Image (cartoon, rainbow, N blue to C red):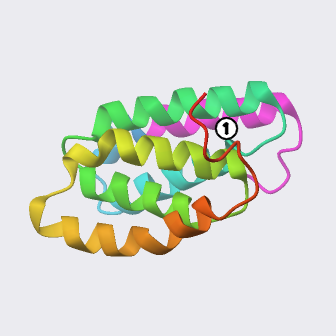
Amino acid sequence: PPQKATTREEKIAYCRSVADQICSQNLRLNKEYTEALSLSITSLIRLQGDKDMNIWTVAEENLNKIIKTHIHKNSFRILLDLFKGIKHRSSIRAQRISLIKFAELSQYIHPQKCRKFIYSLLQPLETILNTEDESLQSRS
């Protein structure tokens, strides 16, 4: 996210702009497209940890838009970025959203990558289960 975007309007505009740009056909032809996709997903996950409900709601909507547009061609990249969101512990809300999205999209994990994801998830899941914050463990 932008370093100086302190107002609600700037953050919301940033979320929408990121999703619009990464979903455009022109960017998909760029050689740095997968890196841009990864940065977009990471920044929207971080913004879901914002204290302002309007910001994290818009960030979630735009993350869903990106996932819906790109899941069939970039499933591994999306799953990897969601996995990083699970491991990153900056915000309970962002970590929770990453975990939920990862679970919803786990059907896209290629069979040869299942073992790697499972072993890599054991430590973050153990940490989540041992946390005192019940909001991370509940689905509501």
Where does the magenta region start and end? 1-21
- Residue 112, compared with residue 40, is above or below; it is below
Residue 77, image quadrant = bottom left
Residue at 37% in and 37% down: 67
Residue 120 visible in rendering:
yes
| Disc 1 residue type (three-letter) | Tyr
Residue 105, image quadrant = top left
Residue at 56% in and 42% down: 97
Q: Which residue occupies the extreme left position in the image?
A: 111
Quadrant for the C terminus in the image? top right
Q: Nearer the viewer, residue 104 or 12?
A: 104
Q: Nearer the viewer, residue 84 or 3?
A: 84
Residue at 19% in and 41% down: 72
Residue at 54% in and 58% down: 85
Principal SS element in the magenta part?
A: helix
For disc 1, the neighbor class at 10 Å (few under 14, some 14 to 19, many from 20) is many
- Residue 132, compared with residue 105, is above or below; it is below
- Residue 45, compared with residue 119, is above or below; it is above
Q: How many marks?
A: 1
Horizontal arrangement in the rendering, residue 14 relative to residue 116 (left or right): right
The residue under label 1 is 14
Residue 33 visible in rendering:
no
**Circle 1 SS class:** helix
Residue 37 locus on image (x, y percent)? 41, 52
Residue 65 locus on image (x, y percent)? 43, 29
Horizontal arrangement in the rendering, residue 5 relative to residue 36 (left or right): right
Residue 53 locus on image (x, y percent)? 78, 27
Residue 1 locus on image (x, y percent)? 69, 52
- Is residue 108 found inside the magenta-colored segment of the image? no
- Is residue 2 found inside the magenta-colored segment of the image? yes
- Residue 111, compared with residue 65, is above or below; it is below
